Image (cartoon, rainbow, N blue to C red):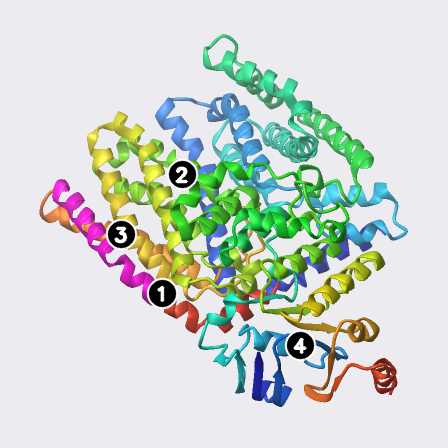
Amino acid sequence: MFFKLLRLEWKSFFRSASFGKGLAVKLMLAFLSLYFFVCFLALGIGIFFLIKKEFGYNEPILFVNNYLLIWFFGEFIIRFLFQNIPIVGIKPLFAQGISRSRIINVLLIKSLFSFFNFITLTVAIPFVIVNSMESSYSVLSLLGWLIAVVAIVFFLNFFNLWVQQRLAKGIKTLLPMIVILLLLIGLEYYNIYSVSTLFGSFFTYVLQYPVLGVLPFALAYYAYKMVYADFRKNLYLDTFTRKGEAEAKIPAADLTWLNKLCKLAPFIQLDIKLLMRNKRAKNTVYLSFFFLFYGVFIYSSDYYGSNNIMHLLVGILITGIFIINFGQFIPAWDSSYFPLLRTQPILVKDYLAAKVLLMYVSVLLITLLSLAYIYYGWNTVYINIACAVYNLGVNIPVILLFSTINRKRIDLDHGSVFNYQGMGISQWLISIPLLLIPMIIWGAVKFVFSIYTANMVLIVLGCLGLLFTPLILKAVASLYVERRYKTVEGFKQKD
Amino acid sequence: MISIQNLTKSYNGTKVLQIDSLHIAKGESVGLVGNNGAGKTTLFSLLLDLIQASTGEVRIQGQLVNESEEWKTFTRSFLDESFLIGYLTPEEYFYFVGDLQGIGKDEVDLHVSSFTEFFNGEILGKRKYIRDLSKGNQKKVGIVGTLLGNPELVVLDEPFANLDPSSQYRLKNIIWELMDRKEMTILISSHDLAHTVEISDRIIALEKGSVIKDVSTSEETLEDLLTFFAM
């Protein structure tokens, strides 16, 4: 029976409608995963020698041990953000003669095959292999160490599910844990007491007594039992539906000031609600704020020097990530109610103008926030402003032009980051000119003249673009009308 | 109000709809009946310019629907859930549609409040998103949305499906009232012959994409239709 259920999972994977479709997207994803795989692999192999050379450790693994906890914490954060409870598809099983415990076991065991469980291993396994050749530790010690790492990964897997399950019931039940976590981070940060060293010393013990490596499995088992017990109690059809939080969260009064924008107001209000109330749309907003911090990594790294072309990429990405993510799915955001919009007396021009206005506001807002990078000098601010103007004037109209070929439906409720619904090859290709062209222009002008001229050129281009935007809007609007049947048809296709 | 000439729609060479000539006068209430795949929804989609006609034309008040947009100001339709916005509350949805139609908030409130009985206390003031409503309640929101501001032409696809018996009865009352006023042209499709006969003064039956019956509703219509479809 257990295997029958697993086989069902297998079928659901290979027979899903999206499996055969979108070869280009698949290739791109395969390429990306290969890229990350190689990166992690290289990290696993290289880190041994890197630590030995840079930090002068004879046994890099001891150095690594001290940072393991931080690595695992990072892994947990990634899991927490992206890994969901694999609940889909179990609904029909409830009504069958299958015991609840069996369903839950399948669900949990299935989660072990999640992509997230392989991230750490891709680094850890090559690292252990290098160690077995280069370090003085025996293969047995290293095997014990690896087993302990695997056990912790499994623990994180179940622990994350448990936390998510708890979170579904409200954040209150997690409060004590959050407090303890903050306390530990504080202790660590102010060098009062280091948990990560304590955690690391356990792994050092494991190297001495490899048998200890089995201990963390107790932890993983305990986490499994906890999730199991929780699911056992709570796994009903309505557990994961939003019925509980269905209440409208924003009072309508909050947005009435928008009415002053007259005819665009209803669309803007609708878009704001779209962004606030749908998982997938919300993610694009979160991502925009997330990207604000991208600059920190580049600016504070000496490697890129100052005024490097990378700084321009950062500028374009920070100020433009929202327009890239939001703009390229116009009008697919409205795909689930497109026929309604088509049969209402709406001018396509107004509809588009509202989207453009929203993107303008996003660029301005993010640019304001990015002013904090003045910490890294005025130059970064100049570059970011130049990028913002370029995004406003050039990239927004370009993205609108691309949007006329959008015909893929988006289901707003499916929100995970690994959801590529609505993605076609064009979505991948579109990002390239948006990022590359300004980089080439800026880099070339900077090379010939100076960085100030390069910034100015971007600003001038942006201003020119702004002047022409109304014309482009008009052209795009008539393209929309021309392709309306195909769009309606495309948006009807659910996969 | 509506005039259709030589209208056909084919997919990959197969004709799914062929209507040589059809006229619907202002104030008429037309029931469209037919089996699955008879072309009811196709006809409505063509009427609303959601799909492209293979040949022929549809005019609403003399204007071609695929060229003019004028008809959208007085035509309202509810074919399926793609006419609803799932992440809005019913109130927000009514205001949104009202905004697009140029109907003020107060007027929307007044209009919506006249459907209190139909809503049966399950829709207004619940602070629930439309996507979380039951299928029947979603349908009610869609139907009431189309009647907002008394449009001249209303198109409803299967309005009785998914409604509970009380709501079906109430919906019939609503439509009767509109029929009495003779101001609104109403097009309703349904599988349910009894319902359709009750709420229309003209019945059009479709079979394999063609009009096979076009009669004024009378005492015998229901029996006629029943025997016809029993074949």
Between B194 and A82, the one lying in front of the other is B194
Hey, which residue is sitting farthest front in the picture?
B181
Residue beneath disc 1: A476
Q: Position of residue A433 (x, y in %)?
A: 31, 57
Report the residue marked by disc 2: A291
Horizontally, is A8 left or right of B181 in the view? right
Question: Label 2 is found on which chain of the structure?
Answer: A
Instruction: Label 1: state its secondary structure.
Output: helix
Q: Amino acid at mark 1?
A: Val
Which residue is at 72% across, 65% downward?
B175
Q: Same subunit under labels 1 and 2? A: yes
In the depicted structure, whether residue B167 falls above or below residue B60:
above
Q: Which residue is mark 4?
A: B28
Seen in the image, is B73 located left or right of residue B110? Answer: left
Q: Residues within 10 Å of mark 3 (few under 14, many from 20)?
A: many
Q: Quadrant of residue B160?
A: bottom right
